[in-house]
Amino acid sequence: MSPPPGTQTGSSSSFEHEMSQEGFSAAITSNGPLLGSVGSFDWAGGAFLHTSKGKVTFINTTRVDSDMNDAYLGYAAAVISRSRVQSLALGAPRYQHTGLVVMFRQNAGTWETSANIQGSQIGSYFGASLGSVDVNNDGSTDLVLIGAPHYYESTRGGQVSVCPLPKGRARWRCDALLRGEQGHPWGRFGAALTVLGDVNGDKLTDVAIGAPGEQENRGAVYLFHGVSVVSISPSHSQVYRSSASHVLFHHG
């Protein structure tokens, strides 16, 4: 029998990869597929990178860091490209109850932590979804989007942080936010997000963000356009709702 998530103490581990749930999330890197493994090492989590040569590398923070117990690292995954060099982002929405996104870069063949972005609200599930956005389509990532679907406000639920890639040694700043419409405190905006490419013909990348809890759990999908200042417009252009269907629930 294994202890339930949230009850493990200290740095000892009951399990390694027996409960890994490999494939919980996925992203494609230049080396091969990256598969999230939220249950590895007592749900501290991590990800497996499978290369074309058959080599498998497990990527995580540390196998004995008790702070990561039950963090669910690998719940979401994204690939960041800068100057043809790729780095990785992994979400850990249960880290210290506020959530965390960990950035990894490769150094001499080893994947190591390069930066952390932590959530602010308890229970927000910050890091539950991730998106790497090349707004101007020049081949380099401009923004990382981080979903916090359980972020609670009195009139709406969920938000997505817009995080421009820092220059040089600057720290990550995620000041801009994307939100759904008011009137949906349990909307879970940001539960899922995807990078669409250019859907309106302006040569800038657009994104779609799900809010499956809106309209009494019938759900909605919001469309946001890229803007020329290399960001995402804070105002959505369209909302696709499932309210017209009597059988579709949790759309988005």
Image: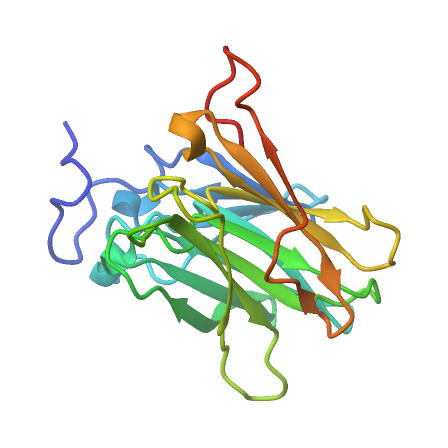
Q: Position of residue 187 (x, y in %)?
A: 40, 40
At x 55%, y 65%, the residue is 162
Quarter of the rendering containing residue 227:
bottom right
Rendering colour mode: rainbow
20 is higher (above) or lower (below) than 83: above
At x 56%, y 88%, the residue is 169
- Please state if 177 lies on the left or on the right of 10 as rendered: right
Q: Position of residue 142 (x, y in %)?
A: 69, 69
Q: Name the quarter where the C terminus is drawn.
A: top right
Q: Position of residue 190 (x, y in %)?
A: 48, 47
Q: Nearer the viewer, residue 44 or 231?
A: 231
Q: Position of residue 86 (x, y in %)?
A: 68, 64
Q: Determine if residue 149 is in view.
A: no
Q: Nearer the viewer, residue 115 or 209?
A: 209
Q: Nearer the viewer, residue 226 or 143?
A: 226
- Please state if 238 lies on the left or on the right of 189 as rendered: right
At x 76%, y 56%, the residue is 205
112 is higher (above) or lower (below) than 60: below
Q: Name the quarter where the N terminus is drawn.
A: top left
Q: Residue furthest bottom?
A: 169
Q: Determine if residue 13 is in view.
A: yes
Q: Residue furthest top?
A: 247
